[in-house]
Image: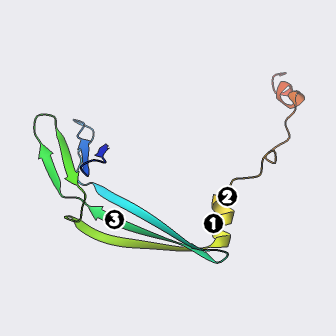
């Protein structure tokens, strides 16, 4: 897939006997936070109108509001975000020693 930022075109190629592009959905996401309470993500999704390009077996869609458009919303409490998206603390995953590894080699 190739998206040209200069002219708002998204182009995808068909792969013969493997992949046929039937739809291209362009998604923009905005995130809003109320510190200490919740996070809201608003997704603007547009199903682009496709134009076939003959000769190179690809399709192109143009962003900008001509296709079917809808919005999706996600509201999450901050505790959910901290539990699932924060990185684990460093050096807390396991204690590793050379003897642990070598003991597996002696059969």
Q: CA distance from mark 1 to mark 3?
A: 23 Å
Residue occupied by mark 2: 86
Rendered residue at 68%/71% (across/down): 79
- List x then y, in percent, for residue 88: 73, 52
- List x then y, in percent, for residue 53: 13, 42
Local secondary structure at mark 3: strand
Q: Residue furthest left?
A: 54
In the picture, measured across the screen, residue 78 lies left or right of residue 62, that is: right
In the figure, 83 relative to 6: above or below?
A: below
How many callouts does the rendering have?
3
Residue 81 numbered mark, or none = 1
- Asked if marks 2 and 3 touch (Cβ < 8 Å), the reply is no
- Asked if marks 1 and 2 touch (Cβ < 8 Å), the reply is yes
Local secondary structure at mark 1: helix
In the figure, 19 relative to 33: above or below?
A: above
Rendered residue at 63%/66% (across/down): 81
Q: Residue furthest top?
A: 106
Local secondary structure at mark 2: loop
* Residue sitting nearer the eye, 96 or 75: 75
- List x then y, in percent, for residue 45: 33, 65
Rendered residue at 19%/46% (across/down): 59
Mark 1 or mark 3, earlier in chain? 3
Q: CA distance from mark 1 to mark 2?
A: 7 Å
Residue occupied by mark 3: 45
> Where does the N terminus fall, quadrant-wise?
top left
Mark 2 or mark 3, earlier in chain? 3
């Amino acid at each position: 897939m190739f998206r040209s930022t200069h002219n708002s075109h998204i182009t995808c190629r068909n792969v013969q006997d493997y992949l046929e592009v039937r739809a291209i959905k362009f998604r923009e996401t905005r995130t809003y936070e109320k510190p200490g309470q919740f996070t809201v993500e608003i997704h603007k999704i547009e199903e682009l109108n496709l134009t076939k390009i003959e000769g190179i077996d690809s399709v192109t869609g143009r962003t900008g509001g001509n296709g079917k458009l809808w919005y999706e919303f996600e509201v999450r409490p901050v505790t959910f975000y901290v539990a699932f998206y924060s990185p684990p603390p460093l050096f807390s995953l396991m204690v590793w020693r050379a003897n642990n590894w070598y003991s597996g080699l002696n059969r």
